[in-house]
């Protein structure tokens, strides 16, 4: 398996970033000014965000390189439907080439951000907010004003704290294992999680191909 490319973001512009759940990375692009079709957008969301759709993790990110106006309208309509299933979709970055999309579970993210270790960690990176919505606003502001990936972003993707810290402390080097992220802590636990995420993505992809809607696939929680 390949990583979700958090380790490749330092020093790179956001237009170069593509996030991935388990699987073979591939660039999300459409030729020219082509718009992403609704079925194509649904397939991409399942491919990159299945564990979040299933309620297994608090959030996922991926980039869509497509006509930004078309994708904005599609995501807005889809987010309204998915909000009733406890899911949110927000744009971290929108530029001439597309957008960076954050798909997340507010309740799970609130629990994650409420962890004392997480709060202390984020405070060291200048996060003053205590509420989930305010902390997210600070993250969005950092994406808006910085061309590089914030090093603390792994917190919002539900990566284990020891791996988030290990990645930063080791500058992305000397990891013990690479799957959906670089592992610096419990390899056995991480590999089990990688496999469960892959199984989830495979099941969701199959169900979507069989005609099940993205809304019905999304677990209500």
Image: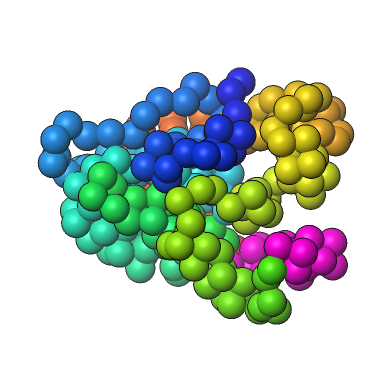
Q: Where is residue 180 in the image (x, y as percent from the top left)?
A: 63, 33
User: Residue at 78% across / 46% down in the picture?
Assistant: 165
Q: Which of 145 and 200 is in front in this view?
A: 145
Give the farthest residue toward the front.
Answer: 11
The image shows residue 37, relative to residue 215, as above or below, that is above
Q: Residue at x 73, y 43 (%)?
A: 168
* Camera-side residue of 51 and 217: 51
Q: Is the magenta stretch mostly helix, strand or loop?
A: helix
Q: Image point 56% across, 39% down: which residue?
A: 10
Q: Position of residue 181 (x, y in %)?
A: 66, 34
Asked if residue 39 shows in the view, the reply is no
Q: Please report the bounds of the magenta region as a residue range.
A: 106-125
| Colour convention of the picture | rainbow
**In-front residue for pair 215/169:** 169
Quadrant, the C terminus: bottom right
208 left or right, relative to 52:
left
Query: Where is residue 50 drawn, in percent x and y?
Result: 52, 42
As drawn, 56 above or below 89: above
Whether residue 110 appears in magenta in the rendering, the answer is yes
Residue occupying the point 13% across, 41% down = 33
Position of residue 208 in the picture relative to residue 158 (left or right):
left
176 to the left or right of 179: right
Location of residue 29 (image quadrant): top left
Expressed as whole percent of the image width and height from the top left, the position of residue 187 reads: 83, 28
Residue 99 seen in the current view: yes
Q: How many labels does the image show?
A: 0
> Quick one: quadrant of the N terminus?
top right
183 in magenta: no
């Amino acid at each position: 398996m390949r990583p979700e490319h958090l380790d490749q973001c330092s020093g790179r512009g956001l237009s170069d970033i593509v996030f991935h759940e388990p699987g073979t990375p591939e660039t999300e692009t459409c030729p020219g000014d082509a718009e992403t079709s609704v079925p194509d957008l649904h397939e991409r969301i399942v491919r990159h965000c299945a564990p979040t759709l299933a309620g297994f993790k608090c959030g996922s990110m991926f980039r869509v390189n497509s006509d930004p106006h078309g994708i904005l309208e599609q995501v807005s309509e889809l987010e309204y439907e998915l909000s009733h299933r406890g899911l949110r979709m927000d744009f971290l970055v929108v530029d001439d080439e597309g957008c960076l999309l954050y798909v997340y579970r507010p309740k799970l993210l609130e629990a994650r951000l409420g962890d004392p270790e997480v709060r202390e960690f984020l405070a060291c990176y200048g996060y003053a907010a205590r509420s989930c919505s305010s902390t997210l606003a600070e993250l969005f502001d950092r994406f808006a004003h910085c061309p590089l990936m914030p090093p603390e972003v792994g917190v919002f993707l539900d990566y284990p704290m020891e791996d988030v810290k290990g990645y930063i402390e080791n500058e992305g080097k000397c990891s013990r294992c690479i799957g959906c992220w670089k592992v610096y802590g419990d390899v056995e636990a991480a590999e089990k999680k990688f496999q469960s995420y892959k199984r989830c993505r495979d099941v969701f992809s199959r169900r979507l191909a069989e005609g099940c809607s993205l809304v019905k696939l999304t677990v209500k929680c």
